[in-house]
Image (cartoon, rainbow, N blue to C red):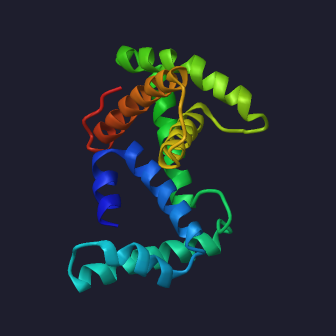
Amino acid sequence: MIVAQEKRENNIAEYLLYMWQVEDIIRACNLDIALINSNIVEQYNVSKEKKAEISEWYANLIEMMRSEGKTMNGHLQINVNIIIKLSELHAQLLESQKMPMYIAAYYKALPYIAEIKSKQGNCDCNDIETAFNSLYGMLMLRLSKKEISNETLSALQTISLFLSKLAELYKKDKSGELEL
């Protein structure tokens, strides 16, 4: 919860990837709050009150996952909504004449995104969701200590740079500083 709040305020892309990881951690703990408390919450070096707050946050996420039918896979609606907002901003940025650096970053990443989409098959994902899926996949490969080719790393770095620009512009948009 503490990490999530900080990431949400500072970098929406990191926040989204973090929340996807939290969803998977909850699933790995079989949506069992006792397991989450003993394996995760108790590891925090914070007061009992703060631990109770964190535990409640996890319990609320578990309830949301159950009520939304996301116990086995998929993403919570709160996270899907972020993808939707980022996709809408992305469309506005592409139409703007004031964002040549963003547009250049997108078109540099686009061939990699298109290649990933072609390998996914039936996925109805838009470019933003595909980009996030690819970065999350890399995160999972790294966590499982699997080797990632230099070619793949280079492609994912390009996608990551594109998403970091989108996240930066999202933050500016949220604070009212973005002029399209």
Where on the picture, by quarter, is residue 48?
Answer: bottom left
Given residues 84 and 37, the one toward you in this image is: 37
8 relative position to 66: left or right: left
At x 64%, y 23%, the residue is 114
Q: Position of residue 129 (x, y in %)?
A: 57, 39
At x 33%, y 78%, the residue is 42
Q: What is the tally of numbered marks visible in this picture?
A: 0
Q: Position of residue 82 (x, y in %)?
A: 48, 49
In the image, farthest residue toward the right: 122
| Vertical relation: 88 (above or below) 113 | below
At x 49%, y 80%, the residue is 35
* The C terminus, quarter of image: top left
55 relative position to 69: left or right: left
Where on the picture, by quarter, is residue 69?
Answer: bottom right
| Vertical relation: 167 (above or below) 57 | above
Q: Position of residue 117 (x, y in %)?
A: 68, 29
At x 49%, y 56%, the residue is 21
